[in-house]
Image: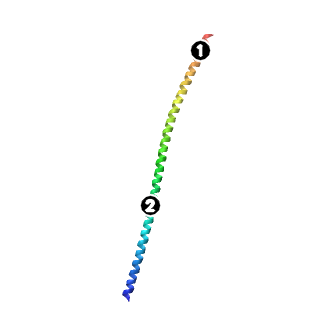
Amino acid sequence: KQWYQRRVAITAGGMNIKKKVAQLKQELDEANDRANNAEALLREKDVIVDKLENDLKSAHQKLSLTEDDLEKAESSVTELTSRAETAEQEAEDAGRQMK
């Protein structure tokens, strides 16, 4: 009878181990699923970050070109203002010489 009780206890313990192993496998599968989902989400975010970085780079290039255009325009305005002042001075001088 003792032998039978010991066998039942060992068998019951074996069942508990099998249940525990099955539970651990299930937990591992769930953890792998969560990890895979997290990796997929990370890849999506990496794509978004890359796009935003490219957009930012493009915006910086446009800003640089716009600043260059502004400098050229300011230079043109300065040159035209100088020419206008010179022409005005020459016109005043010519008006004085006619008198």
Mark 1 falls on what kind of element? Answer: helix
**Considering depth in this image, is 74 or 1 the residue closer to the camera?**
1
Q: Give the residue number, with chain letter if any, for mark 1.
A: 93
Q: Tell me which residue sits at (46%, 59%) in the image.
A: 37
Q: Earlier in the sequence, mark 2 or mark 1?
A: 2
Which color scheme did the rendering employ for the protein? rainbow
| Residue neighbourhood size for the residue with mark 1, other residues' Cα within 10 Å, grouped as few (<14), some (14–19), many (≥20) | few
Q: Which amino acid does label 1 sit on?
A: Asp
Task: Report the residue marked by disc 2.
Answer: 35
**79 lies left or right of 19:** right
Q: Is residue 63 left or right of residue 22?
A: right
Q: Position of residue 32 (x, y in %)?
A: 43, 63
Q: Residue at x 45, y 62 (%)?
A: 33
Give the quarter of the image for residue 3: bottom left
Nearer to us in this view, 75 or 37: 37
Q: Residue at horizontal 43%, vertical 66%?
A: 29
Please identify, in this view, whether the residue under mark 2 or under mark 1 is nearer the observer: 2
Residue 14 rendering spot, x and y as whole percentages: 39, 78
